[in-house]
Image (cartoon, helix red, strand yellow):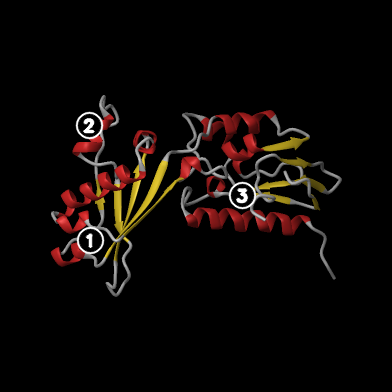
Amino acid sequence: DAHENSMKSHKSETSTKSPVKIVLRSGRVLRCERVIIATSPAVYASSIVFEPRLDALRVQLAQRMPMSCMIKTLTFYRRPFWREKGLSGRSYTHHPLDSSDLLAQLDSEGPVTETYDNSDPSGRFGCIIGFIMGNRVRLFSSLSPQERQRKIVEQYARLWGSDEALEPVGFAEKNWIEDEHCRGCFMAIPGPGVFSQLGPLLWTPSHRLHFAGTESAFEYVGYMEGAMQAGTRAALEVLSSLPLVS
């Protein structure tokens, strides 16, 4: 049940001696020996009630690692027309950080910072993944869905010099800042000095709690590879803490 298992309003009671008690917002109670939390500090520190409370330094870490802003878009076409021009579909659009008029910049350059070809390998259909990041996410979110799509395809038409970009057959978007379980993407960003002073708390267990998530990886932080590495590490920590079964 997605609603029942939502992390929001969860309550977790932990100690070094007794099993962990987890109260879901539906009222259902779970008990387990160990818990792996595989989300960013910014989310677990604000969405889960811990008893005993998280230690102060871990809360400080969470307060200093806000989630980044990103919208992921998928624009579908009847065919990958850019390939006929010898183009890869990959692009990077430089957006000055000190722009005083972001709306005008959206009109002149477009909202998308990075694009990648995500078409079927055989070319049966065309698909471009586009990432919108930073301040543009907040401004872009205020536009209507139709206006958002229009600005994206107009940018693609300029990038690849083809009006065919103006005629997509499908469009999908995911605004990660609106997702209650992550509140941003790709990852939480530590402020200056945070990692050097508090970084080890990202992966150090606390009582019976273990921490995974891409931010706690030793390599490839922010990527799926980092999330897999962190999950493997946390699983091994749990296995090593449990008694051997004969």
The circle on residue 38 is 3
Who comes first in sequence, dot 2 or dot 1?
1
Answer few, some or many: residues within 10 Å of disc 3's Cα (few below 14, many 20 plus, some between 14 and 19). Answer: some
In contact (CB < 8 Å): disc 3 and disc 2: no
Can you give x and y, in whole percent of width and height, for residue 104 in the image?
A: 22, 31
Q: Residue 158: give its label.
A: none
Quadrant in which the C terminus appears = bottom right
Tell me the residue that label 2 is attached to. 104
Q: In the image, residue 90 lies at what x, y percent? A: 26, 55
How far, Cα to Cα, is label 3 from label 2? Answer: 39 Å
Residue at 36% across / 51% down in the picture? 73
Question: Which residue position is annotated with label 1?
Answer: 88
Q: Amino acid at mark 1?
A: Ser
Q: Is residue 34 visible?
A: yes
Please state the horizontal and vertical placement of residue 113, each as a whole percent of the image.
29, 44
Q: Amino acid at mark 2?
A: Ala
